[in-house]
């Protein structure tokens, strides 16, 4: 292991035992994959509500926010188990693997 005080004393560059770039890359991809269902549902609801608000002439921000929030929370509840499984597998691969 390379500690900060060893780096300051020796003046040498120290690298960890694992490569950080693949870990960050897989974490970002996994995060995007986990957020995609809720964000896509929110986008679709926002488009539908936006079209309805434009057609009726009602431009109240609360009318646009409440259905989007309800749909996104519902999607999070429906896909929550899958999201937790993916988080656990990412944790096991990144932290618990040698």
Image (tube, rainbow, N blue to C red):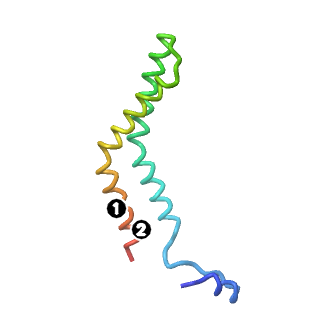
Instruction: Please rate how many residues cluster around mark 1, counting C-alpha atoms within 10 Å: few if below 14, some from 14 to 19, many from 20.
Output: few
Does residue 55 appear left or right of residue 70 in this picture?
right
Q: In the figure, 93 relative to 27: above or below? A: below
The image position of residue 98, as x and y in percent, is 39, 77
Number of residue marks:
2
**On screen, 4 above or below 54?**
below
Q: Nearer the viewer, residue 48 or 13?
A: 48
Labelled pair 1, 2 in contact (Cβ < 8 Å): no
Alpha carbons under labels 1 and 2: distance apart: 10 Å
Q: Which mark is residue 88?
A: 1
Mark 2 Cα-neighbour bin, 10 Å: few <14, some 14–19, many ≥20: some
Residue 27 sits above or below residue 47 on the image: below
| In this picture, residue 3 sits left or right of residue 57 | right
Q: Residue at x 38, y 33 (%)?
A: 70
- Residue 69: image quadrant is top left
Q: Which secondary structure lies at badge 2?
A: helix
x, y percentage for residue 44?
41, 29
> Which corner quadrant of the image does residue 45 belong to?
top left
- The residue that mark 2 highlights is 94
Q: Position of residue 81 (x, y in %)?
A: 29, 51
Which residue occupies 46% across, 23% down? 63
> In the picture shown, does residue 40 fall above or below 91?
above
């Amino acid at each position: 292991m390379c500690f900060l005080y060893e780096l300051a004393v020796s003046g040498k560059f120290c690298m960890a035992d694992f490569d950080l770039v693949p870990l960050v890359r897989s974490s970002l991809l996994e995060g995007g994959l986990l957020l995609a269902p809720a964000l896509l549902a929110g986008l679709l609801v926002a488009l539908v509500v936006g079209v309805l608000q434009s057609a009726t002439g009602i431009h109240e921000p609360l009318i646009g926010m409440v259905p989007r929030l309800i749909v996104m929370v519902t999607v999070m509840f429906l896909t929550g188990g899958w999201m937790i499984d993916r988080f656990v597998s990412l944790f096991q691969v990144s932290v618990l693997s040698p």
